[in-house]
Amino acid sequence: MQKIVTGKVFVLGDNVDTDQIIPAQYLTFNPSIPDEYKQFGKYALSSVPPAQKGLPKGRIPFHTKDEFVSDYTIIVGGRNFGCGSSREHAPVALAAAGIQAVVAEFYARIFFRNCVNGGYLTPFESVDRLCEKVCTGDELRIDVVQGVMHNLTTKEEWRLKPLGEVAPILEAGGLFPFAQKAGIV
Amino acid sequence: MSAMTLTEKILARHADRDHVVPGDNIWINVDVLMTHDVCGPGTIAIFKSHFGGDKAKVFDRNKVVIIPDHYIFTADAMANRNVQVLRKFAAEQELPYYYDVGTPRYKGVCHIALPEEGHTRPGEVLLGTDSHTCTAGAFGEFATGIGNTDAGFVMGAGKLWVKVPPTMRFVFHGELPPYLMAKDLILAAIGDIGCDGATYKAMEFDGDGVYALNIEERMTLCNMVIEAGGKNGVIAPDQVTFDYVNARNAGQKPYTAAYSDKDANFCFEKVYDVGKLEPVVAKPHSPDNRATVREVKGTKLDRAYIGSCTGGKMTDFRAAASILKGKSVKIDTFVVPATSEIAQALKTERLNGQTLEEVFLSAGAKIGEPSCAACLGGPSDTFGRLNTPISCISTTNRNFPGRMGHKEAQVFLASPLTVAASAVGGVISDPRDAL
């Protein structure tokens, strides 16, 4: 897990479910095959309704220069991020598109687990409702050790909740390296 | 020793502990791991890469169940390739419980196939690579959905870490009126607590209104707990459960039922008088966007859909047939039996002389092959998929944007009674007017 995450933010709203993150028609790709993994990046967030895409304005494309990888590094969302289907293809799609961290008020459980155990990206929980304070395109800097997110564009800063019990798994790089270290497998 | 809920007891037992409390992180032993064609190939790849490549062996071949069900009747080459991956793996691992496409063993929707084939037992732990794995809580077990990494881990290690959830209790009292179904009860509960109201929590259902339900209706209740964010849904077993399980138990495996202690601690409790509830729908685009049918009656529809793990069981089709018998549908109506066993029963079970299949066909509905079909959209040639931004009333479980295909399609979730009445009306219609 990186100690510092920096980059442009893409802002979404509440209850972004995993069908919006990666629609079911693309689940025929196998994420363990490199050529197919790329496709998840291409179709990431493709079912988010246009008005909800890139808040506060909306109708902002997630991909600009590259059709597989987005210019954005961080997603800020609202409540219940990643609800719905258990598909691990959802954090895979975000990671394949270049997303390194999501900051949401709270997560649906399976999505959160998949982020942590798969080691794809870091799911931070915010104290404040940041999806109404941050604008798509702002430059952010997340200091993982300090638990603080800086908005380099507006010079604001907010506290993030501690990663708590999942921190050791994220630090190990996911469930397998964590379990190996702990002598479980 | 303080009292425990049913969920806590099952988790404690599977962690070889006397006691657990909500919030404990524990390693639990898994009784059954289930995967399917959408998540199986990814799971298998992760399993192999960490447990010895081509030499990798599953932790127990009798505990890994593979049920292709999502993208089966499609020309999509990738989807067909994925079934091929499962087939090869099942052969190489000599898995006795693989239900292959194109053979008499083919089943259809995994959550209905699991109990039909005897893989659900009270007191057990079932993990599956599908969020609706929670359906099996209807058999008094701990059942929840997991991702590919977790499943790849379980496939090799037979265990997984879980956080013990606090339990919410939903009590339904009274006799269910003929115009209501379990779908109305769970949509009412989700509407009350919201689609994040049970996040990280167990939902236990209790009360004479629940125990009066047959096993399929209990499955509908537990099936949709994930739509409130629930980790698992559970109903303590009674004779109805034991009769069903004992008649089908694969390998006649012994099991030990668990029950919540009388003084167990529930973090929430809500009591319903089912006689006072009404037929409801979940309006677009969220399962918690509840309205009574009375409030939305007359809303124009383009399509009706009856199927899925939520609404494609015999009880669902009996209910729909009771309304469609002798009538004609006004809108395209798709009927998809969850499993091949149900598809067969539609051809044999009769309602006033006609088979249920005849009832549906003569009403003008189309009947598809058993699978998940359009519940989650899928490849564009999927039976019943919403390929254009139309309006559909459906017995399925989710109506987030794009779930059934087109991202601007409008999906209303409702009971099979309400969906059938609406198919006849061409607009959202009240089953009380049709029965």
Image: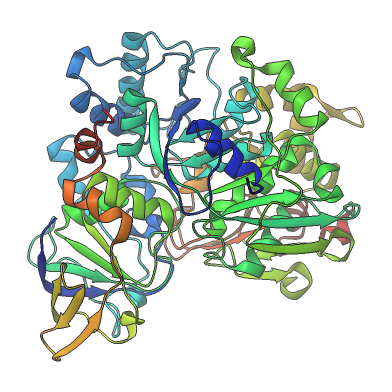
Total number of numbered labels?
A: 0
B151 on left or right of B239: left
| Residue that appears at 17% across and 51% down | A171
* Residue with the most extreme left position: A65
User: B260 or A78: nearer the eye?
Assistant: B260
Q: Position of residue B152 (x, y in %)?
A: 31, 31
Q: Position of residue B331 (x, y in %)?
A: 66, 54
Q: Position of residue B169 (x, y in %)?
A: 69, 56
B129 on left or right of A137: right
| Residue that appears at 18% across and 61% down | A99
A167 on left or right of B386: left
Q: Quadrant of the N terminus of chain B?
A: top right
B340 on left or right of B15: right
* Residue B171 picture quarter: bottom right
Q: Position of residue A7 (x, y in %)?
A: 10, 72
User: A156 or B2: nearer the eye?
Assistant: B2
Q: Is residue B334 visible?
A: no
* Residue B13 picture quarter: top right
| Residue that appears at 50% across and 12% down | B103
Colouring style: rainbow
Residue B31 lies, with reference to residue A97, above or below; the image says above
Q: Is residue B289 visible?
A: yes
User: B12 or B222: nearer the eye?
Assistant: B12
User: B337 or B96: nearer the eye?
Assistant: B96
